[in-house]
Amino acid sequence: MNYCIYLRMHNPRKTIILWGIILFFISFLPVTDTFAQREDEHACEKSCGEKDEHIREQTNKDENNHDHSTSAGENFLNSTDSGHELYEKLLKKECEHDVSIIKCDECRYEVGVVKVDPSLLDEIVIIGKGMPMDIGITHEATGEVGPNQDRFVIVSPRISGVVKEVFVDWGDQVKEGQKLALLDSIELGEARADYLKAAAMLKLAEKNYSREKELYGKNITSGKHFFDAENAHEQSHIELNALMEKLLLMGQEEGSIRQMQEKLLLMDQEEVDIKHTAKAEKHVSSLFTLTAPFDGTVIDKKVAVGELKNAFDPMLTIADLTQLWVWFDVYEKDIPKVRMGNKAMVSVASYPEEQFEGNVTYIGNTIDEKTRTVKVRIEVANHHEKLKPGMFARVLLQVDDAKSAVGLPEEAVQVDGQERFVFVPLKDGYFIRRNVILGTRLNGYVKVVSGLEENDPVVVKGGFLLKSETMKEKFGEGCGGH
């Protein structure tokens, strides 16, 4: 800039010439750069266009091949034809190698077919049949086994006494009326003596009343003596009945009380007086026995010989273990699913392979404020007595009517993404994959809603080995990889 100014100031002509030269060269520079840039862009577009066209052609080719193989495969995967029919269809279908697709080692995987070495059959790969399975929709819950409270009793004395003998032990099976323990009670002995005394006094009152009645009828005695004898007789009856009620409240049976009274009456009728009554009282027993109220098992024992037991102290616990209750919780949203009489299957950790069937016999009327659940009870038969009160249980509650369907072992079903499938035998050691829709699972089996018919042959064991073979296509093998 300073140079140009200097030229302009000292030699204007040279300045003009210099500016002309500079502008001349500057005008050529952008044009050259633009031509080069355009040349490069044109070459790039030509190259990229050829590359894109090649990619599109290759992609279309791959997609056509994939769509062809996929659609063909899906037709066979969802086919319900028999194994023989499928085998014949696959024999007629040729792959891109111009051979039957089922015979092509590279292409059979595209239609879900795999060939198994005969040496593996019946040892690693086992063929079975779908079995009928009556399962409705189920609700799963966790519960606890408990005793049947209607057949559960804590045995205790109604009066205090000293334990003289115990006839049963933990786990003993008892029958209704069987003796459990023998106790000695002073209170009971006194009550029995009072009853015998009252019985004797009633007998004397009856004799006196009969005599006064006869004399009064003959006008030998006064009316006062007759009415006094009558009142004494009635009072003796009342007292005897009151003492019998007392013995009954102490747990004594009416039959045993009558027997005790009959022994007194067996004495010489003419000698029943206070003297003989006192003699009878000396033979009154203060012992009493506790008996089983029903058939059951002794599940608790809190008694020892020589121990003083007060009234209503627990001594033995008896439960009928042939019928048990299983309690579980149901959330508010699931309450409409549960109905009285619903069938349920119960399993416990001790016997994981077994299921115990029961029915809903009670649905709670209130909801727990903390857990927001309602209690539900199942009654389960337990004649084998494998279930024990206190066990945790897994409950599968059937909440709709059971419908017959095909059932398979869970290991027979394979998984591929969102699809579930099994393998069906074709012929000559060939197997084909068949997609299925599953339903309820129970006790190691699963219900097949569609895709398989009852008694259809199917691989029940070793299916994972076949699956690994059919997955080769996904790892680049098969026709698509060549």
Image (cartoon, rainbow, N blue to C red):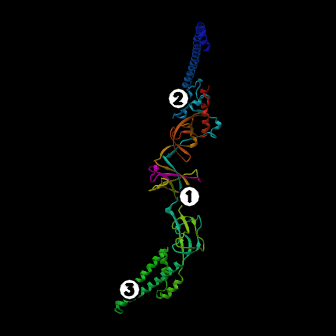
Magenta stretch holds residue 343: yes
User: Label 3 is placed on what type of residue?
Assistant: Glu
User: Label 2 is placed on what type of residue?
Assistant: Ser
Q: Are marks 1 and 2 in contact (CB under 8 Å)?
A: no
Q: Which numbered circle lies on residue 176?
A: none
Figure quadrant of the N terminus: top right
User: Label 1 is placed on what type of residue?
Assistant: Gly
Where residue 320 sits in the image (x, y, percent)?
53, 62
Q: Which numbered circle lies on residue 390?
A: 1
Magenta stretch holds residue 357: no
**Residue designated by label 2:** 71
Instruction: Please identify, in this view, whether the residue under mark 1 or under mark 3 is nearer the observer.
Output: 1
Which residues fall within the magenta stretch? 329-350
Sequence-wise first label, 2 or 3? 2
Seen in the picture, residue 182 relative to 55 is either above or below; the reply is: below
**Residue designated by label 3:** 230
Where residue 326 sits in the image (x, y, percent)?
52, 56
Q: Nearer the viewer, residue 39 or 474?
A: 39
Mark 2: give few (<14), some (14-19) or many (20+) Cα within 10 Å.
Answer: few
Residue 414 is left or right of residue 399, and the answer is right
Visible residue check, residue 213: no
Where residue 71 sits in the image (x, y, percent)?
52, 29
Sequence-wise first label, 1 or 3? 3
Seen in the picture, residue 272 relative to 362 is either above or below; the reply is: below
Taking the view exactly as shown, the residue that stands out farthest to the front is 10
Mark 3: give few (<14), some (14-19) or many (20+) Cα within 10 Å.
Answer: some
**Label 1 element class:** loop
Which quadrant of the figure has residue 462?
top right
Residue at the image point whose x is 49% and y is 46% from the top: 134
Residue at the image point whose x is 59% and y is 25% from the top: 99
Sequence-wise first label, 1 or 2? 2
